[in-house]
Image (cartoon, helix red, strand yellow):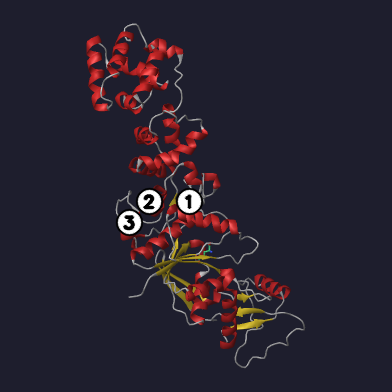
Amino acid sequence: MTVVRTRFAPSPTGYLHLGGARTALYSWAYARHFGGTFVLRIEDTDLERSTPEAVQAIIEGMNWLGLHHDEGPFYQMQRMDRYREVVGQMLEAGTAYLCYSSPEEVEAMRERMRAAGDKPRYDGTWRPEPGKTLPAVPEGRKPVVRFKNPLDGEVSWDDVVKGTITISNRELDDLVIARPDGTPTYNFCVAVDDWDMQITHVLRGDDHVNNTPRQINILRAIGAPLPLYGHLPMILGADGEKLSKRHGAVSVMDYPAKGYLPEAMLNYLARLGWSHGDDEVFSMEQFCAWFNTDHLTRSAAQFNNEKLAWLNNHYIKQADNARLASLARPLMEAQGAQFDGAPDLGAALGLMKERASTVNELAESAMLFFRTPQPDAALVAQHLTPAVKPALSQFAERLRTVEWSKEAVAPVIKEVLAAHGLKMPQLAMPLRLALTGQLQTPAIDAVIVLFSRETVLARLQNFL
Ligand code: GLU
């Protein structure tokens, strides 16, 4: 059995976007499923656009998601000697050749072909063929190296997402694999890397479909085994357009900032291009156990913020309160939350998490326990009626000695209501106002014991 080796090969020209994260997730999960190896390769040969900050941003995004690589990161810029070596070997083997046509000449030949209604391509002036005499080498001109693409036949592969794809070799040019200064070009580097890194499965965005026949021809020419390819369809916005900033955040690291949990993001991305029956909610352990290439979706997926928010709410509800507290605390500090003598933050968040779609919403909603209550005077007048006041006083009195738990406080509320002939809201509303300044809170018994006895008594005293 082949050992599975997958790779994620981002170009570090910006942040890790959602499409890239999904590619990384699938490649990672595929390796995990088969007990294989997941390689991280940084394709940084575009010197104009690649930055170390982008490398950091990509690694940060993958760390946040927990997509840890087993090998790498390998940097293409550190592999230049290896690419030069392979170029040399190909020249020697006759699978590549020196081409002295100037850029102007190449442009002119393309122009001629366009005018004749043909697909513009290199005309093979410098391509050696048996019995052919090559032109004289122009003085002082540095050659490029071109790949000797097969002239006839076709390239075909069984794409694990899209099915069989076949491209005629006539469609493919003799690709430049090394520039006049010797630097190798994109498709060539990818082919050499996939060979050297013994990649068995290439999952990537379908914007690379056009590169695949070129890479396959190069791999064949250098005697490398072919990986299996799977080209994942694009992620679209809800309006069916290509996902862009216009649709909201496209950078993965915007999501922790907006209060999303990584497990929600992973679960969401997993379903965005793959399915397992009707399963919508699953752990990464489950996903790795299920994930293979059988159920990848052929059509483009649409990003749906509501569904992501729904999943995030699910994982917030599952999350440990102490973990939520460490995420929410800085947000609440920034909003002026007072933590001295205040309720336990984890317990407060636990009371509020049922309805929060993001940690930011959760933090916002829990602020009511961490501010000095300032109930609106009109609301106080409305709810603290003469009929209610004595009941509230009696309740405060009972709170001095009752055991400080929800289970012990709840029956006391009932007793006081019965003794004064009141209904629950008549006592609960003024209590809410007194303790939080607001009328909407979770169940009043839970809110009472969230605070310390001293705080509750002090606030009731102020209120009455
Ligand atoms: N570096 C390419 C990109 O970021 C990916 C290349 C590949 O997966 O083969 O789009």
In the rendered structure, the answer to whether residue 62 lies left or right of residue 128 reads left
- Picture quarter with the C terminus: top left
Q: Is residue 236 above or below residue 393?
A: below
Helix, strand, or loop for circle 3? helix
- Of labels 1 and 2, earlier in sequence is 1
Residue indicated by mark 3: 285
**Among the two numbered marks 3 and 1 on one chain, the one whose residue lies closer to the N terminus:** 1
Q: In the figure, 344 relative to 271: above or below?
A: above
- Indicate which label's residue lies in the foreground, 2 or 3: 3
Alpha-carbon span between mark 3 and mark 1: 27 Å
Asked whether the viewer can see residue 229, the reply is: no
Question: Residue 124, located in which quarter of the rendered image?
Answer: bottom right
N-term-proximal mark, 2 vs 3: 2
Tell me which amino acid carries mark 3: Glu
How crowded pointer 3 is (Cα within 10 Å; few <14, some 14-19, many 20+) is rated as: few
Q: Quadrant of residue 134?
A: bottom right
Q: Is residue 173 left or right of 255 when viewed as pictured?
A: right
Image point 32% across, 18% down: which residue? 428
Tell me whether the residue at label 1 lies in contact with that at label 2, contact meaning CB atoms closer than 8 angstroms: no
Q: Secondary structure at mark 2?
A: helix
Q: Is residue 245 visible?
A: yes
Give the vertical position of 405 relative to 392 (above or below): below
Q: Nearer the viewer, mark 3 or mark 1?
A: 3
Tally of numbered tags: 3
- Gap in angstroms between the C-alphas marked 1 and 2: 18 Å
Residue identified by numbered label 2: 267
Label 1 sits on residue:
236
